[in-house]
Amino acid sequence: MDYVPLETLIDKTSHSLYKLVILASRRALEIAEGQPSLIGPCPNTKPSVVALREIAAGKVSYKITK
């Protein structure tokens, strides 16, 4: 079982759980559709876990557009 501490994730999204969920779901969808992982190969790991690991590592972030 993979565990990504919530404290490391929530700091990456300006302390917004909503932004974290949206960012992780969009990145997990990209990975499921075939985009390569930014943290190296992760065989037999779910796309959602890979997305959370990427966010925790600072490889994925969000940008607010108007």
Image (tube, grey):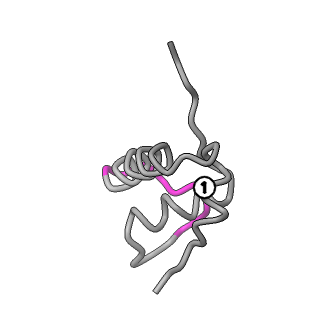
Magenta segment range?
33-41
Residue appearing at x 60%, y 59% in the figure: 9
Crowding around mark 1 (Cα neighbors within 10 Å: few <14, some 14 to 19, many 20+) is some
Question: Looking at this view, is 60 or 10 the one in front?
Answer: 10
The image shows residue 40, relative to residue 24, as above or below, that is: below
Q: Position of residue 51 (x, y in %)?
A: 48, 58
Query: For the point 53% across and 79% down, which residue is it?
Result: 3
**Relative horizontal placement of residue 48, taking residue 42 as reference (left or right):** left
The residue drawn where x is 59% and y is 64% is 40
Q: Is residue 49 left or right of residue 56?
A: left
Q: Quadrant of residue 46?
A: bottom left
Rendering coords of residue 5 (x, y %): 60, 72
Total numbered circles? 1
Give me the residue at 44% from left, 48% from top.
27
- Closer to us: 12 or 17: 17
Question: In the image, is residue 24 above or below residue 42?
Answer: above
**Overall secondary structure of the magenta stretch?**
loop
Element at label 1: helix
Name the residue furthest bottom.
1
Amino acid type of the residue that numbered disc 1 sits on in the rendered structure: Ile
27 in magenta: no
The residue identified by callout 1 is 10
Residue 12, image x, y percentages: 65, 49
Q: Decide: is 65 above or below 43.
A: above
- Residue 43, percent from left and from top: 44, 76
